[in-house]
Image: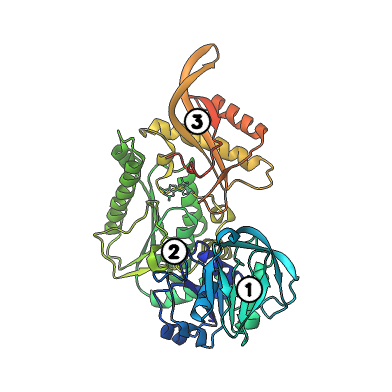
């Protein structure tokens, strides 16, 4: 399979670069600049190399640099932002601080007709984010694009193998970004496009059919898309030798445990057991108010239950996990130094040892996992489910968790989801849910005053959940939802709508 190396210098869009390449049906692999040497790059027979952006100043000694031999391998190289400045630095040109000419945001680019920009308009919009610039191009290079403030927005060497772009083609604001990737991959690197997530999933099925023949494999199922797709791949490969364990901690949304069981076991035929462990979790959570402590207790209890079930089903030598490619990169194999901030339910039991761990999705991005999921016949409702935190409703019930509060929240949340489902919205919010606050307020039902809980509704519009805006839901929809919640859920007296943005607020309330 042809592949492109994305050499990571720590920029925030590096995963996006790899995704853009894969969208063009070419496999891209992200490696940290300090994790692979130039000889290994030559050995691996990459069709092309992309040097990513990064937060450093290339002229500082402590900044990440690379062996200049990378430019002599005969493999086409595309440097983006810091990557372009690094090419300039390695080839003997000059990079300087742009001072007040720094550019950030959409900028007009004027470009020449070159192989990389073939047939693209002479003027277009590109997206810039830089405080340094290429002040003198290396010998043997020429400038092929410029903006009002950046004399070298694009350059290439005269052999036509090495390219540098000061702007970011991977960001959708760059009008012809996709075309530029296409030219680089197909016209310059000579790729033919043999990658697809669905092809990958099919190959994984074949591979595990051989590799795991006669072995029993354990997999924790959460009902989320990753563990479900991993389960279907393994189910198709090894059938009943896959043993899925679905730990229902009782903090799922209304009807969700049954839906997960019905879909995975009933419809898809996966060999799995459901453990109803609500009582255990509620007992452990009694008297706990602090959100991080709730997360920790749930994470630990989850592992306990999983371990117990694993022991019950007898000796199992292989553990499968739904790890996806961003988890692999974020766990330190890339340079972006992203620290996982969320404690996810489903960690690896520490004192149960397995001979082998398999991760069927560890080369796929989230959207590729979804694509594979659809091809494998998983229902779209499950594949495109909104994200749901591992600790479940525990982080949506402020203060102490009780069975009564879980029930109230499940009912209120179900009404909100039902109303959103029915509404004719152009686009559904990225995530939407109800929160049970720890406040009570006065209400009047019939002729009687009563004290009920205040429920908050949260709906956010977001691309990546790192930043989020509150969704401008129609007033009628909010009104109808609020009226139904107060009327139908005894114990709730008031409904409010959360209009906080992230940052500074978070999506979840705890
Ligand atoms: P925040 O609240 O940090 O949420 O803005 C961003 C995204 O992460 C989800 N989230 C979690 N997911 N375990 C998870 O698996 C957690 O503890 C957790 N906390 C937040 C949240 O639902 C949103 O999609």
Label 3: state its secondary structure: strand
Q: Is residue 159 above or below residue 250?
A: below
Residue closest to the far left: 351
Q: Secondary structure at mark 1?
A: strand
**Separation of disc 3 and disc 2 at Cα?**
38 Å
Q: Which residue is mark 2?
A: 336
Q: Which residue is mark 1?
A: 154
**Classed neighbour count for the residue bearing mark 1: other residues with Cα under 10 Å, few (<14), some (14–19), many (≥20):** many
Q: Taking 509 as reference, is 25 above or below it?
A: below
**Alpha carbon of mark 1 to alpha carbon of mark 3: how far?**
53 Å
Disc 2, SS: loop
Mark number displayed over residue 50: none
Q: Is the C-beta separation of discs 1 and 3 under 8 Å?
A: no
The reply to whether discs 3 and 2 touch (Cβ–Cβ < 8 Å) is no
Question: In the rendered image, which quarter is residue 199 located in?
Answer: bottom right
Between tags 3 and 2, which lies in front? 2
Vertical placement of 93 versus 444: above or below? below
Q: Which numbered disc, 3 or 2, marks the residue that appears first in the sequence? A: 2
* Residue ID at (43%, 74%): 65
Query: For the residues carrying marks 2 and 1, which lies nearer the camera in this image?
Result: 1
Q: CA distance from mark 2 to mark 1?
A: 24 Å
Of 415 and 504, which appears nearest the observer? 504
Q: Residue visible at 46% across and 69% down?
A: 9
Q: Position of residue 166 (x, y in %)?
A: 59, 69
Determine whether, in the image, residue 272 is placed left or right of residue 156: left
| 61 relative to 369, above or below | below
Q: Position of residue 418 (x, y in %)?
A: 59, 39
Q: Which residue is mark 3?
A: 455
- Other-residue count near label 2 (Cα within 10 Å), few / some / many at <14 / 14–19 / ≥20: many
């Amino acid at each position: 399979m042809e592949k492109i190396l994305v050499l990571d210098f720590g920029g925030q869009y590096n995963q996006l670069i790899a995704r853009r390449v894969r969208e063009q049906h070419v496999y891209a692999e992200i490696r940290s600049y300090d994790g692979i040497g130039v000889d290994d790059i030559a050995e691996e027979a990459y069709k092309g190399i992309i040097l990513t952006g990064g937060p450093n100043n290339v002229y500082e000694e402590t900044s990440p640099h690379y062996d200049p031999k990378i430019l002599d391998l005969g493999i086409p190289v595309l440097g983006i932002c810091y990557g372009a400045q690094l090419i300039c630095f390695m080839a003997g040109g000059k990079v300087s601080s742009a001072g007040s000419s720094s550019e950030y945001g959409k900028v007009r680019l004027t470009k020449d007709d070159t192989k990389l920009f073939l047939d693209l308009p002479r003027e277009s919009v590109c997206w810039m984010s830089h405080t340094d610039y290429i002040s003198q191009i290396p010998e043997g290079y020429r400038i092929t694009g410029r903006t009002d403030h950046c004399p070298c927005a694009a350059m290439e060497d005269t052999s036509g193998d090495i390219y540098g772009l000061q702007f970011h083609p991977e960001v959708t604001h760059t009008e012809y970004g996709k075309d530029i990737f296409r030219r680089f991959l197909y016209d310059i690197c000579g790729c033919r496009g043999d990658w697809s997530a669905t092809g990958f999933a099919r190959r994984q099925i074949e591979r595990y059919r051989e590799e795991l023949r006669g072995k029993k494999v354990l997999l924790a199922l959460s009902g989320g898309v990753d563990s479900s797709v991993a389960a279907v791949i393994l189910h198709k490969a090894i059938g009943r030798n896959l043993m899925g364990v679905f730990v229902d901690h009782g903090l799922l949304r209304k009807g969700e445990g049954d839906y997960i069981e019905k879909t995975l076991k009933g419809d898809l035929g996966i060999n799995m057991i459901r453990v109803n462990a609500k009582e255990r979790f509620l007992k452990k959570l009694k008297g706990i108010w602090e959100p991080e402590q709730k997360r920790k207790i749930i994470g630990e209890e989850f592992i306990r239950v999983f371990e117990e079930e694993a022991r019950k089903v007898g000796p199992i030598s292989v553990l499968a996990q739904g790890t996806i490619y961003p988890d692999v990169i974020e766990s330190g194999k890339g340079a972006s130094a992203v620290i996982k901030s969320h404690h996810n339910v489903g960690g690896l039991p520490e004192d149960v040892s397995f001979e082998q761990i398999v991760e069927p999705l560890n080369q796929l991005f989230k959207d590729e996992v979804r694509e594979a999921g659809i091809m494998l016949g998983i229902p779209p409702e499950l594949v495109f489910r909104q994200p749901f935190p591992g600790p479940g409703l525990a982080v949506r019930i402020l203060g102490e968790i009780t069975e009564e509060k879980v029930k109230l929240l499940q009912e209120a949340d179900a009404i909100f989801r039902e109303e959103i489902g029915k509404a004719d919205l152009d686009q559904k919010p990225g995530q939407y849910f109800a929160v049970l606050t720890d406040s009570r307020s006065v209400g009047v039902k019939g002729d009687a005053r009563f004290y009920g809980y205040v429920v908050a509704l949260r709906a956010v519009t977001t691309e990546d959940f790192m930043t989020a805006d509150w969704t401008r839901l129609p007033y009628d929809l909010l009104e109808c939802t609020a009226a139904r919640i107060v009327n139908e859920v005894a114990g709730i007296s008031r409904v409010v709508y959360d209009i906080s943005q992230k940052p500074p607020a978070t999506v979840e309330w705890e």
